[in-house]
Structures are given as structure tokens and as C-alpha cells.
């Protein structure tokens, strides 16, 4: 039973490819695999922390003020992530830029607090947070890897083509994000149909 | 425990207490990360200074100065045993393909360029972003802007522009020239 909460986010309800939530950061920062992974991990941390706290506090939060309360909780964890990354991973922080503070308005996080954590007990909420987070991270890393391989001829900053080789620049730029995203959603749909999940 | 009903008192109390606890947590993290954030920022500048001037023994960051009418340009004198060996100049341009970008130019005491390092840029990846690669920026090494025409060949200068990124190359020259002008005006310290 519990395991289902965890695996849910990986493919069946993958936040990016199935629920199509959080597209703004997903498309904007995935110009390289490293950026995708970093953004995914930051989001996972916020998702896990907010799910945990919301599940713990759910009975203390009256229904009518639940959204402001959730936002305060989420914004706090995002700001913590922001400051910690600024201190210890300055390069990644610079590459992700404005999209770290914007995790606050990432629909995945408020969505999971609203749709899952406030209705469930602590353990399922924690598992859901980790599962959704890993699902989001995998999706972002995959998107970033494909774009980096095609657009820059490298993966995780390790170049495997000659320095002056022609690469498909389009994939690093904005249109490449949409094209790759579209294909990945299609592939996810095919996989889901084929294996009936 | 049953869920708290949505009375005014409950709502005000619960939102206030949550906000209070969260701001306390934030304050704590802020204090804990303040020092590392500062260090990370300084280290970035120091790394860039080290990359563009010869070896030095002072702390250029603490001796930084600015020149009148060159706002946004910061000069970091690098000294070895009290002797000036070069000046790292943080300069910028507003005419890049995506507007603003900033670079660090290292000048030797005679005014010639020792090295250049790109600090902050958001030029097109794969095109304009090539300005941080040696293929482009190394052509400035050893050149003295007094005798070197700091514009791209298209504009009658001596700089080989990056293929398909003339605007970025032009902006790069603009930034280097600004550093040199500030240096000439402000003198060495």
C-alpha cells in the first residue's frame, strides 16, 4: 500500500510528463543535465519538507485559511533552499537564477499539499513527496540530458564531440525545450498504454 | 484530533503562529548562511582577479577603488611586495545581444592586456557565449589598447569577431575599452 504512494510519482502520475505541472521551470532551466538535476533536487527538498509539515499540521489549520498557511510553509522552505544554495553551490545557483525563488509558485508543490498531504497521514505524505520529487527530478534530468546531448554535444558538462563540431543549437534554445517536451510526453503516453499503468 | 473549525479566532491564531514559527526558522537559516554566502561571492571575484593578473600577494578586494564618471567599473590593484604588478578591472557593457554582461579585464602597469575573464553573461548559448572561450578572448592578450584598434573588423578595427555573433563581439570590445578608459583616467594606485 505504502509503496504505491512512492511509485505513483515516478511514472503513473509523473508530475511533468503526465500531470504536466511545473512546466515553467522545467522548460526554462533544462538547457543542461546538471541544471535539470539541480532544479529537480531543490524542488524535491521543498516538496518533501512541505508535504511533511502539512501532514503534521493539517488538523491545526482551519479549512478557510489552508491555502495561505500552505504558501507560508512552502515559501519558507524555498527561501531556505535559496540561501543554502547561494552559500554552498554558487555556480548552480547562478545558472538556475530566478527559478529557485519561483519554486514557491510551482504547482506540483501546492498541488501535492492540497491534494495529498492535507488528507493523508505522515508516512504516506512523506513517501508521496519523495516519489513525486524523484519523478520530477528524473523528468527534468532526462529533458536536460537530451537537450544538452543534441544541442551542445556533451552530458553533465563532459564534452564528447570536437570543440568546433556543429551541434543542433536549436535544442539549447527555447524551441528545443518545447520540441523535446512534446516528444517525451508522447513517449510516456505510449509506455503507459503499452504496460497498462 | 479533530480538525479545527474555521472560526475567526482559530484562523487568525493558526495563520499567525505558523507565520511566526516559519519566520523564526528563516531567521536562523539566514544567520547560519550569511557568512558562507559572502565568502562565496568574494571568492568568485578573487578567482576572477587571480585569472587575469600576474601573481600577487596583497588582497586586491580590500584595496578596490572606483573612478569618477565610470559607474559600475571597479578597479582591483594587484601588488606583489608592495609593487603594482597589474590591475584587475571589473567592467560591463549594455550593448550585448541580451543587453548587460560583465567581464574582468587584467591590465599590466604599462596598460597592455594580460588576460580577460567573463563574469556574468546571458548571451545566446553556443553563439555569443563563445566569448568566454580562449579562441576569442585570447586575441586580446598582450595587446595595448593605446595602439590596438578595439573594434571588430567589420567596423574597421582589429578584433576577429565570433562567427555569427558580431553584436556580442562588439559589446565585448566596448567593455574592454571602458575598462581601459577608466584605467587611463583613474591612474594606478
Image (tube, coloured by chain):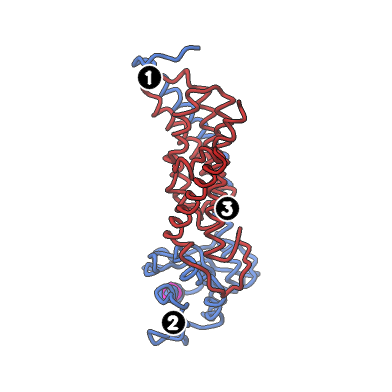
Chain colours: A red, B blue
For label 3, count other residues whose C-alpha is less than 10 Å away and answer few (under 14), some (14-19) or many (20+): some
Q: Please identify the dominant SS of the magenta region.
A: helix
* Chain of the residue under label 2: B
The C terminus of chain A appears in which quarter of the rendering? top right
Name the residue furthest left.
B8
The N terminus of chain A appears in which quarter of the rendering? top right
Left/right of residue B150 with respect to residue B63 in the rendered view: left
Q: Secondary structure at mark 2?
A: loop
Of labels 1 and 3, the one closer to you: 1
Q: Which residue is mark 3?
A: B40
* Chain of the residue under label 3: B
Decide: is A26 above or below B93.
above
Give the mark nearest the N terminus, 2 or 3. 3
Decide: is A158 above or below A181.
below
Question: What's the distance in space between the residues labelled 1 and 3, CA to CA?
Answer: 41 Å
Left/right of residue B112 with respect to residue B157 in the rendered view: right
What x and y, as percent, mark residue B6?
Answer: 37, 16
Q: Which residue is mark 2?
A: B150
Q: Could one spot residue B34 in this view of the protein?
A: no
Residue numbers of the magenta segment: B173-177
| Mark 1 in CB contact with mark 3 (< 8 angstroms) | no
Q: Secondary structure at mark 3?
A: helix
Q: Residue at x 52, y 59 (%)?
A: A147
Of labels 1 and 2, the one closer to you: 1
Question: What's the distance in space between the residues labelled 1 and 2, CA to CA?
Answer: 65 Å
Total labels drawn: 3
* Chain of the residue under label 1: B
Q: Which residue is mark 1?
A: B11
Q: Quadrant of residue B166?
A: bottom left
Amino acid at each position: 500500500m505504502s509503496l504505491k504512494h512512492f511509485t505513483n510519482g515516478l511514472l503513473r502520475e509523473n508530475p511533468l510528463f503526465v500531470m504536466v505541472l511545473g512546466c515553467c521551470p522545467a522548460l526554462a532551466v533544462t538547457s543542461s543535465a546538471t541544471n535539470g538535476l539541480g532544479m529537480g533536487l531543490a524542488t524535491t527538498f521543498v516538496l518533501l519538507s512541505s508535504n511533511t509539515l502539512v501532514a503534521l499540521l493539517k488538523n491545526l489549520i482551519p479549512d478557510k485559511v489552508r491555502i495561505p498557511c500552505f504558501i507560508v510553509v512552502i515559501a519558507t522552505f524555498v527561501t531556505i533552499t535559496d540561501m543554502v544554495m547561494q552559500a554552498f553551490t554558487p555556480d548552480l545557483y547562478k545558472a538556475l537564477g530566478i527559478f529557485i525563488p519561483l519554486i514557491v509558485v510551482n504547482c506540483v508543490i501546492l498541488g501535492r499539499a492540497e491534494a495529498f498531504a492535507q488528507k493523508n497521514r505522515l508516512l504516506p505524505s512523506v513517501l508521496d513527496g519523495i516519489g513525486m520529487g524523484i519523478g520530477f527530478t528524473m523528468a527534468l534530468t532526462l529533458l536536460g540530458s537530451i537537450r544538452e546531448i543534441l544541442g551542445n554535444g556533451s552530458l553533465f558538462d563532459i564534452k564528447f564531440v570536437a570543440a568546433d563540431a556543429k551541434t543542433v543549437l536549436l535544442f539549447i534554445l527555447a524551441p528545443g525545450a518545447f520540441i523535446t517536451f512534446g516528444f517525451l510526453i508522447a513517449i510516456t503516453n505510449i509506455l503507459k498504454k503499452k504496460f497498462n499503468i | 484530533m479533530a480538525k479545527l473549525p474555521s472560526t475567526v479566532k482559530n484562523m487568525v491564531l493558526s495563520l499567525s503562529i505558523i507565520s511566526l514559527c516559519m519566520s523564526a526558522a528563516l531567521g536562523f537559516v539566514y544567520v547560519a548562511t550569511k557568512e558562507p554566502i559572502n565568502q562565496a561571492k568574494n571568492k568568485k571575484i578573487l578567482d576572477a582577479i587571480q585569472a587575469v593578473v600576474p601573481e600577487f600577494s596583497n588582497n586586491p578586494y580590500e584595496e578596490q577603488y572606483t573612478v569618477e564618471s565610470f559607474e559600475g567599473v571597479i578597479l582591483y590593484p594587484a601588488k606583489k611586495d608592495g609593487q603594482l604588478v597589474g590591475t584587475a578591472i571589473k567592467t560591463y557593457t549594455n550593448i550585448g545581444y541580451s543587453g548587460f554582461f560583465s567581464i574582468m579585464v587584467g591590465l599590466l602597469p604599462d596598460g597592455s592586456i594580460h588576460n580577460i575573464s567573463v563574469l556574468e553573461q546571458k548571451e545566446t548559448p553556443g553563439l555569443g557565449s563563445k566569448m568566454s572561450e580562449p579562441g576569442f578572448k585570447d586575441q586580446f592578450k598582450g595587446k595595448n589598447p593605446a595602439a590596438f584598434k578595439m573594434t571588430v573588423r567589420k567596423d574597421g578595427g582589429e578584433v576577429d569577431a565570433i562567427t555569427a555573433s558580431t553584436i556580442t563581439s562588439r559589446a565585448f570590445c566596448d567593455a574592454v575599452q571602458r575598462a581601459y578608459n577608466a584605467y587611463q583616467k583613474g591612474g594606478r594606485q
